[in-house]
Image (spheres, helix red, strand yellow):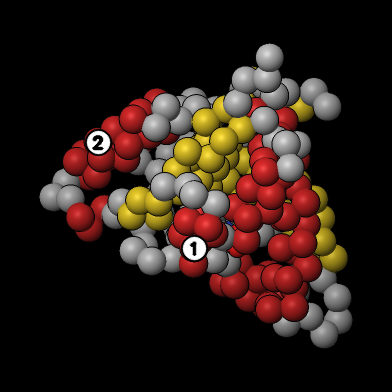
């Protein structure tokens, strides 16, 4: 019998990575169900993708709570209520509170549109990453998918794929090429996680393909 993993997606904006993953769930390639989409924004476009698929959406934002503890409690109780087993960050702007990280060891993943540890950390988000990459003059960028810990873009790296920077690239043109790789790679990683094919020891990630 196939056991479906319960996934929560955290996203702040557009949701194209979420859509790419959802597509593979709907086709049966990924053995999971998305039980909720959580955002720090009230009406992000990603909610439209979720609503169209009948997936519950929740806006949970630090500003709604008096203390960081209350914020973390609200997130955690929602995740427990939905019996979430895996958290997939897909363009989520905020830091994941420590209690959530501790409650989900090696069960929170993030995608970043550059080759970490370069061009990562607080403030490196979306188009800003590609602007910094082009301004630096590097010839190679790419995609990183990693486990999430208490710091921005810092957890053990699951996989990386390079994308060459071409003459004439603008941040927008480069973002588009990087996004194509994201849409291919992230569903593969989520599939492997749902099949328990990825293990991590001392920051070393082994992917049993
Ligand atoms: C993606 O390019 C993702 O890698 C990036 O935000 C975009 C979200 O797009 N994430 C970060 O920069 C994290 N630091 P999407 O909402 O269409 O999936």
Real-space Cα separation, disc 1 to disc 2, in angstroms: 26 Å
Residue at coordinates 57% horizontally, 27% vertically from top-left? Answer: 5
Which residue appears farthest toward the top when viewing the image?
A: 1
Q: Is residue 118 visible?
A: no
Labelled disc at residue 48 = 1
- Residue at 34 percent of width and 30 percent of height: 81
- Quadrant where the C terminus sits is top right
Residue 183 lies, in percent from the top left, at 72, 55
Binning the other alpha carbons within 10 Å of mark 1 as few (below 14), some (14 to 19) or many (20 upward) gives some
Question: Camera-side residue: 120 or 70?
Answer: 70
Q: Nearer the viewer, residue 98 or 30?
A: 30
* x and y percentages locating residue 48 in the rendered image: 49, 63
Of labels 1 and 2, earlier in sequence is 1
Residue 181 seen: yes
Quadrant of the snapshot with the N terminus: top right
Q: Which residue is label 2 attached to?
A: 73
**Disc 1 or disc 2, which is closer to the eye?**
1
Residue sitting at 32 percent across and 37 percent down? 78
């Amino acid at each position: 019998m196939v056991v479906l993993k319960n996934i929560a997606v955290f996203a702040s904006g557009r949701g194209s990575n979420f859509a790419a993953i959802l597509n593979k769930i709907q086709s049966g390639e990924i053995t999971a169900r998305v039980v909720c989409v959580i955002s720090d924004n009230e009406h992000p476009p990603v909610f439209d993708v979720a609503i169209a698929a009948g997936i519950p959406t929740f806006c949970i934002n630090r500003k709604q709570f008096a203390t960081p503890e209350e914020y973390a409690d609200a997130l955690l109780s929602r995740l427990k209520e939905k019996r979430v087993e895996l958290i997939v960050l897909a363009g989520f702007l905020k830091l994941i509170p420590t209690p959530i990280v501790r409650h989900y060891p090696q069960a929170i993943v993030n995608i970043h549109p550059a080759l970490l540890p370069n061009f990562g950390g607080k403030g490196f988000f979306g188009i800003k990453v590609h602007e910094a990459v082009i301004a630096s003059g590097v010839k190679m960028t790419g995609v990183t998918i990693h486990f999430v810990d208490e710091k921005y873009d810092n957890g053990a790296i699951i996989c990386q794929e390079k994308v060459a920077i071409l003459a004439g690239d603008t941040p927008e043109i480069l973002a588009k090429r990087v996004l194509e790789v994201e849409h291919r790679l992230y569903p593969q990683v989520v599939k492997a996680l749902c099949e328990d094919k990825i293990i991590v020891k001392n920051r070393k990630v082994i992917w049993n393909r």
